[in-house]
């Protein structure tokens, strides 16, 4: 059958349905990403204006947040809290997520590895507020004894180092940055694990055999030789996971709680996302403006991480 | 004491797991597997324990009655359950067509050069902080939807910008990428011979797309359930636009409502002042956990059963 005959067979009506149907799919596909541009545009237009109004970029990034009667203010304490908790959470998330990913990606023939894989799949989809509530429950259960037996003696032993140490180590409050970081890391672990697992699972069998041949021990083969084959995917996973947890709010609500002052990380700690959540729901214009400024800062951080991850990956 | 041991033993446990990686790799890796499974088990157990007081007092009535009256220490989460179901239904009805559109656009319609860019945009939609969606919903989407719906209906249907419908539309935007990712994966796995056979019998491009979508229906159903899990659990963005109507039971999507997760987010800060509120909220969290477990288990089962 020649090409021309084939075209004749297709009636005009089917051609029309073809055009309309494909057009509909394209329209729906575009509709899914249009809101992204609307949101980014909205946040930057109102956010940059708000930052200028509240005292310029440097002032906004370092100063205390405005009260309803102020005209200037910033997000300093929240930015510090977000950076600290995200860094800790990402560190812990990668430290546990990577070996876990190797386990569920490399040992697929083990029965328990499949159980762990199902667990990871479930955890990655878990409502993030549930994770926050879980960490809160553990924290309230452990806090008293933890302070009595471990943290009081520890902070006393460390006191010769100077006052700055009390900002990081000391008796914990019910809400603290470490609980926030723990909640964030529980969200990040399955994320890193799944991408690591699929990277390891996609290694071709001959390459794997070669790695075991020159690596000798399991450890060398998996972590030294094959690491080269998957490092790209793993770095991408780590970066995207970090971008994800940097903007999380729900798990921090009952763990870090939020704070508007520069305060020790052992007590309630502010986060940019928590500030947006709080300030946007107040009726004061200046607070809403600072929420938009904070959103612009948070979005910039996340866009930078995302773009770096994409260019590398 | 139990909690203390739990937190303190975590550190030696992880150090042991790392140490074992060098000595006996398989056992070291298994310890990390145990860690994640234990986390899920502990989470469920913890919620059972914390929710026990209210379940001992009211039984399952806490899930079956719609009242939220902390002053009388009377709690029921049916209104939140209804809100979760309604917002998720609106979200899924809007998100699934968009997710199919994304999958088809990326795999069929776009030239190869643009596929990566479009895919990145969709992924970015999934990475955006939920609180920024909430901010946008609060000041842009809510008021826009209100005037749009009222203009279309020719009367005042939405008296407030913040309703279950607003939350559903916002959720649809947020969960589309999750469903789309699964469908995209399945779509790209359609075997070349099958595709060639479809075109060989003279199908138009659109007809081919429909046949291929039917071929990957397991992925579509799996993506549906994964996105549904996300929609039910989403907290911050929903809490900002849903209206925060804690007490009144409503099935009208154009009224303010509440969902389970936003109930927890909005009420937990007050829980310390009441005797049974925290247990009631933990019971709600338990419900959310069970939903999450069941929905994700179904999704994983369907995707694995139907793997091409």
Image: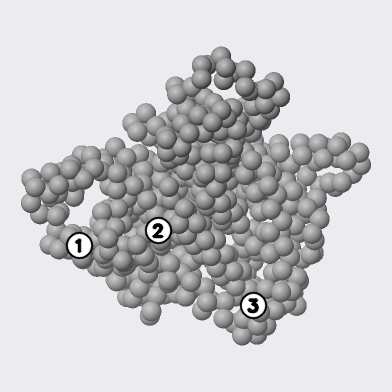
Disc 3: which residue: B276
Q: Residue A164 location in percent, x, y?
A: 33, 53
| Residue drawn at point x = 17 percent, y = 43 percent | A206
Left or right, B8 with respect to A191, comes to left
| Residue drawn at point x = 72 percent, y = 68 percent | B78
Q: Measure how far apart labels 2 and 1 are at the Cα level.
A: 18 Å
Secondary structure category for the residue under label 2: helix
Q: Measure how far apart labels 3 and 1 are at the Cα level.
A: 46 Å
The dot on residue B26 is 1
Secondary structure category for the residue under label 1: helix
Disc 2: which residue: A120
Q: Residue A114 location in percent, x, y?
A: 35, 62
Q: Which mark is first along the chain, 1 or 3?
A: 1
Left or right, B33 with respect to A12, comes to left
Q: Looking at the rendering, which quadrant does residue A6 occupy? A: top right
Most extreme residue toward the bottom is: B56
Q: Relative to B100, is B74 above or below?
A: below
Q: Residue B11 location in percent, x, y?
A: 28, 65
Chain containing the residue with disc 2 = A
Nearest the eye: B137 or A313: A313
Nearest the eye: A113 or B125: A113
Nearest the eye: A116 or A80: A116
Q: Residue B50 location in percent, x, y?
A: 53, 76
């Amino acid at each position: 059958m020649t090409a021309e005959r084939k075209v004749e067979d297709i009636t005009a009506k089917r051609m029309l349905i073809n055009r309309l149907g494909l057009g509909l799919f394209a329209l729906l596909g575009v509709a899914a990403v249009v809101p992204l541009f609307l949101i980014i545009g909205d946040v930057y237009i109102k956010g940059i204006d708000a930052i200028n109004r509240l005292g310029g970029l440097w002032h906004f990034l370092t100063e205390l947040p405005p009260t309803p009667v102020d005209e200037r203010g910033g997000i300093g304490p929240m930015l510090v809290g977000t950076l600290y908790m995200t860094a800790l959470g990402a560190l812990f998330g990668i430290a546990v997520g990577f070996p876990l990913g190797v386990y569920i990606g490399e040992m697929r023939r083990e029965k328990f590895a499949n159980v762990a894989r199902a667990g990871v799949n479930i955890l990655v989809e878990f409502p993030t507020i549930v994770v926050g509530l879980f960490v809160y429950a553990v924290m309230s259960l452990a806090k008293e004894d933890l302070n009595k037996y471990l943290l009081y003696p520890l902070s006393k032993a460390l006191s010769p180092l100077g006052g700055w140490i009390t900002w990081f180590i000391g008796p914990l409050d019910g809400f603290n940055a470490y609980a926030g970081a723990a909640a964030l890391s529980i969200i990040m672990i399955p994320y890193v694990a799944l991408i690591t697992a699929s990277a390891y699972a996609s290694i071709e069998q001959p390459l794997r055999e070669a790695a075991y041949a020159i690596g000798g021990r399991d450890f060398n083969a998996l972590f030294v030789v094959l690491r080269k084959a998957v490092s790209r995917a793993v770095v991408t996973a780590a970066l995207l996971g970090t971008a994800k947890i940097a903007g999380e709010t729900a798990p921090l609500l009952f763990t870090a709680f939020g704070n508007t002052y520069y305060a020790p990380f052992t007590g309630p700690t502010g986060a940019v996302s928590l500030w947006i959540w709080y300030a946007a729901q107040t009726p004061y214009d200046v607070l809403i403006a600072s929420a938009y400024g904070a959103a612009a800062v948070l979005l910039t951080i996340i866009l930078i991480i995302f773009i770096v991850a994409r260019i590398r990956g | 004491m139990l909690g203390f041991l739990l937190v303190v033993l975590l550190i030696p446990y992880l150090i042991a797991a790392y140490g074992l990686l060098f000595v006996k790799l398989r056992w070291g890796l298994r310890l990390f597997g145990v860690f994640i499974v234990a986390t899920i088990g502990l989470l469920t157990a913890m919620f059972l324990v914390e929710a026990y007081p209210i379940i001992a007092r009211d039984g399952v009535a806490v899930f079956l009655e719609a009242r939220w009256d902390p002053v009388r220490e009377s709690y029921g989460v049916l209104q939140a359950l209804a809100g979760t179901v309604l917002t998720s239904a609106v979200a899924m009805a809007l998100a699934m067509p968009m997710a199919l559109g994304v999958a088809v656009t990326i795999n069929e319609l776009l030239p190869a050069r643009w596929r990566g860019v479009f895919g990145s945009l969709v992924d970015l939609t999934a990475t955006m902080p939920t609180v920024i969606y909430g901010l946008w919903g609060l000041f842009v989407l809510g008021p826009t939807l209100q005037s749009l719906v009222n203009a279309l209906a020719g009367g005042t249907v939405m008296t407030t910008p913040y309703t279950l419908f607003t939350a559903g539309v916002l959720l649809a935007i947020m969960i589309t990428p999750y469903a789309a990712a699964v469908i995209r994966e399945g779509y790209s796995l359609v075997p070349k011979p099958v595709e060639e056979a479809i075109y060989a019998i003279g199908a138009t491009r659109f007809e081919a797309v429909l046949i291929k979508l039917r071929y990957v229906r397991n992925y579509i159903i799996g993506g549906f359930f994964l996105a549904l899990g996300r929609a039910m659990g989403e907290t911050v963005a929903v809490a900002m636009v849903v209206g925060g109507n804690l007490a009144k039971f409503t099935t009208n999507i154009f009224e303010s409502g509440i969902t389970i997760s936003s109930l927890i987010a909005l009420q937990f800060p007050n829980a310390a002042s009441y005797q049974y509120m925290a247990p009631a909220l933990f019971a709600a969290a338990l419900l959310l956990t069970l939903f999450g477990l069941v929905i994700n288990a179904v999704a994983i089962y369907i995707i694995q059963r139907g793997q091409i």
